[in-house]
Amino acid sequence: MSDEIIVVSTPYLPGHKITKTLGFTWGLIVRSRGLGRNITAGLRSLAGGEIHEYTQLLNQSRQEALDRLKEHAATMGANAVIGVSFDSSETGGVMTEVLAYGTAVVVEPETGAASPVRLG
């Protein structure tokens, strides 16, 4: 069911109207880099440039946080999440926290002529 959740970073969903706001939703993951990745990444950092092991870990973590956000929104009865953002931090020098958050809403397609979007 969470695969059906629409996720956008904007405060609205073009072509849809918000019929109900359900509240704040989030997905959180904390991952350890692990000893092997730390050693490999440490050696690569000596040469400079991108550290692929960390890039891969953060991409996987971001996707998992987004999947968890969608699962949480689905349990709230939402079919969309608007205003989605990500935040991350390091804990203890060996763990990375990735948080995806937004507002869970119920939307339905607009019928008729589209109305202009007004911000502010």
Image (cartoon, rainbow, N blue to C red):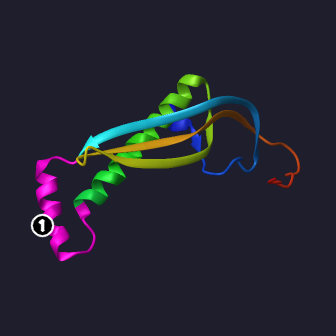
How many numbered discs?
A: 1
Q: Position of residue 65 (x, y in %)?
A: 42, 41
**Residue 4 sits above or below residue 96 on the image:** above
Q: Position of residue 17 (x, y in %)?
A: 78, 40
Q: Is the residue marked by circle 1 packed among few (<14), some (14-19), or many (20+) residues within 10 Å?
A: few
- Chief secondary structure of the magenta portion: helix
From the viewer's perspective, tell me whether residue 15 is left or right of residue 82: right
Residue at mark 1: 43
Q: Is residue 94 magenta?
A: no
Residue type indicated by callout 1: Leu
The residue that appears at 61% across and 24% down in the rendered structure is 77
From the viewer's perspective, tell me whether residue 58 is left or right of residue 69: left
From the viewer's perspective, tell me whether residue 113 is left or right of residue 37: right
Question: On the image, which quarter does residue 81 sit in?
Answer: top right
Q: Does the magenta stretch include residue 40?
A: yes
Q: Where is residue 97 in the image (x, y as percent from the top left)?
A: 36, 43
Front one among 79 and 11: 11
| Mark 1 element type | helix
Front one among 116 and 45: 45
The span shown in magenta is 33-52
The residue that appears at 80% across and 42% down in the rendered structure is 110
Please, which residue is most extreme toward the front here? 92
From the viewer's perspective, tell me whether residue 98 is left or right of residue 4: left
